[in-house]
Amino acid sequence: MKCNVGRTDRIIRVIIGLTIIWAGFYYENWWGAIGIVFLVTAVIGYCPSYTPFKFSTCRKDD
């Protein structure tokens, strides 16, 4: 897998992911599980939904 999620994108994904997970616990529903997807894509640096569109937020040297 080639990097297609850059540094800024990763930071945003972590913040969104943690917020969604917190909301899932707070409201006691399954939506928190969606936050895990944001965290995983931030950690591995790859987003499958970017691939079909050949979209990348990585710099050339990443």
Image: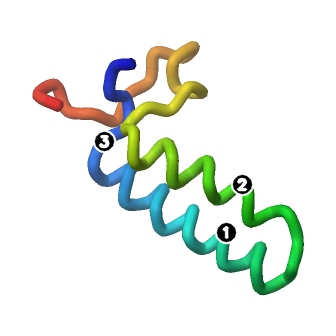
Q: Amino acid at mark 3?
A: Gly
List the residue tagged with mark 3: 6
Which of the 4 image quadrants contains residue 12?
bottom left
* Residue at position x 39%, y 39% in the image: 44
Q: Dot 2, crowdedness within 10 Å: few (<14), some or many (≥20)?
A: few
Q: Amino acid at mark 1?
A: Ile
| Residue situated furthest bottom in the rendering | 26
Comes first in the chain, label 2 or label 3: 3
List the residue tagged with mark 2: 34
Q: Dot 1, crowdedness within 10 Å: few (<14), some or many (≥20)?
A: some
* Residue at position x 49%, y 42% in the image: 41
Helix, strand or loop for disc 1: helix
Helix, strand or loop for disc 3: loop
Residue situated in front as seen by the camera: 11 or 28: 28
Q: How many marks?
A: 3
Q: Measure the C-alpha gap from mark 2 to mark 1.
A: 7 Å
35 lies left or right of 12 = right
Residue 38 vs 3, above or below: the answer is: below
Q: Are marks 2 and 1 in contact (CB under 8 Å)?
A: yes
Q: Nearer the viewer, mark 3 or mark 1?
A: 1
Marking on residue 20:
1
* Residue at position x 56%, y 70% in the image: 18
